[in-house]
Image: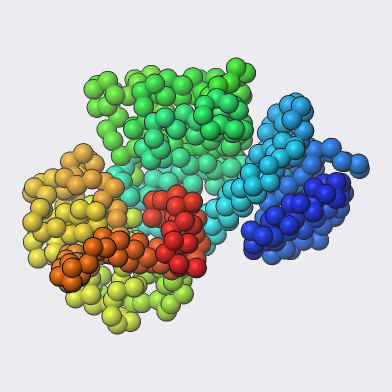
Amino acid sequence: MKPIWIVDDDQSIRFVLEKALLREGLPTRSFTNPREVLLALDSATEEDGPQVLVSDIRMPGGSGLDLLEKVKQKLPGLPVIIMTAFSDLDSAVSAFQGGAFEYLPKPFDLPKAVELIRRAVEESQREEVAEERMAATPEMLGQAPAMQDVFRAIGRLSQSMVTVMITGESGSGKELVARALHKHSPRANGPFVAINTAAIPKDLLESELFGHERGAFTGAQTMRRGRFEQADGGTLFLDEIGDMPFDLQTRLLRVLSDGNFYRVGGHNAVKTNVRVIAATHQDLEQRVKEGGFREDLFHRLNVIRLRLPALRERREDVFMLTRHFLQQSAKQLGVEPKRISDAALQQLSTFAFPGNVRQLENICHWLTVMAPAQVIEPKDLPPEVLGAVAEPGKASALVEGVPSPRHPPPVGEVAHGPSAEPAHADKISVPMAAVSAAPVLSSAWEAGLEAEALALLATGRSDVWDVLTRRFESKLIQTALLNTRGRRIEAAQKLGIGRNTITRKIQELHLE
């Protein structure tokens, strides 16, 4: 791991932080003034550069704010923490305006300072993962006419700052389109910030979007910049906009109108320059008629609408996408890429893919791990695909990723065939979150769990719940860490749990 750079002319501050961070397993490198830091940055390689920069605000030979500005020019994604006296409020505000990750008031509580630095490290690592993915993966793949239309639209919109609304079923790749629009725009050097408005609780979403002032609510110990401020000069992607609470829609409309907003608990307007791209799998016109979505906000967002086709509308792309995802899965797991026979590809291409491209990617992950031979044959395909072939005309129903032949969706609920009309998300008889789940070994694992539970219960034990729960959690976390090559933050994101939760579970389950 790259070191934490500490800049302070006070030797005692440097010493205390160095010892505390080393106890946490975080390497450090210390400097006495900004000039030393800038010289070190010029000669630093990618491996020994800073993971996080912690700098005092007032030092002989230079200001921490000046250093912040120069460092951000060289490393715009580097989290910078500015240390400042309690009374120096103006400096703290200036630090945030300059793009600081947080400010640390002096005198500081050492455990809180370490926790703040650890949060900055996790943010830095998360950004590195995202950059690796974007650099290693082609933006989008597709030869089908429907996808070629999408590519042409991205090209036409590349130099425009117009607001775009991306529609399409869950798992069809709406965020990839948003990233492509950003990458090919004049804002490409600015940040791309994405937020799923459906995944964040209503009482936290306002703070996530607009930030909050210190003391705005219980637990708000410092001022926090929201996603609109983080995306200043770049692009903000609002995914699943149709699920945004009605009262927040009013605030969003105001920001889109004049670029001004107030942090939660704030009294001074904040100005931001952000291009907004929104996405939804819902029929927003219907949501407007039902009174669940503001009509004026709909018209503000719906300047240019870009419809992304479902995978069943571009079946000719299944071949190239499957081979691409098999290569990608093998690289992530550090194994030899598996090949897929023409017969298996042909059978796979007849599947309806209610979870779209995301579901195909998950199937390829499953095949990389579970297929017994190096060449994937039709019999090796996951149960939901084989089940769909066994019952033509019906799509396999997935409940939390497990095929359930006893509950197939009604015929006609999911469109089939290349010429079928695209099915709306509300016409699929399973939750969209479920169809994107990774495929598993049919219901065999449930049968195995039942047998194991019966065997333990027969012994008269009174800790069966704890025993099986620990085994289940251990296997789930180990598999996720294998998938992410040990990157805990990414594993937690994929599992849908918090980073503190996965760290605690690893310790409790002795998985170190």
Q: Residue farthest to the top? A: 267
Task: List x then y, in percent, for residue 3.
Answer: 70, 59
Q: Is residue 161 above or below residue 473?
A: above
Q: Is residue 194 left or right of residue 454?
A: right
Q: Residue farthest to the right? A: 61
Residue depicted at x 69% and y 65% = 47
Q: Between residues 80 and 302, which one lies in front from this camera angle? A: 80
Residue depicted at x 38% and y 55% = 495
Q: Is residue 286 above or below residue 484?
A: above
Task: List x then y, in percent, for residue 237.
Answer: 47, 39
Number of labelled discs? 0
Visible in this render: residue 119? yes
State the colouring used for the structure image.
rainbow
Q: Between residues 88 and 243, which one lies in front from this camera angle? A: 88
Residue depicted at x 14% and y 58% = 404
Task: List x then y, in percent, for residue 182.
Answer: 53, 43
Q: Is residue 478 left or right of residue 456?
A: right
Residue depicted at x 58% and y 26% = 215
Task: List x then y, in percent, for residue 435.
Answer: 25, 52
Visible in this render: residue 137? no
Residue 315 location, quadrant: bottom left
Which image quarter is the N terminus in? bottom right
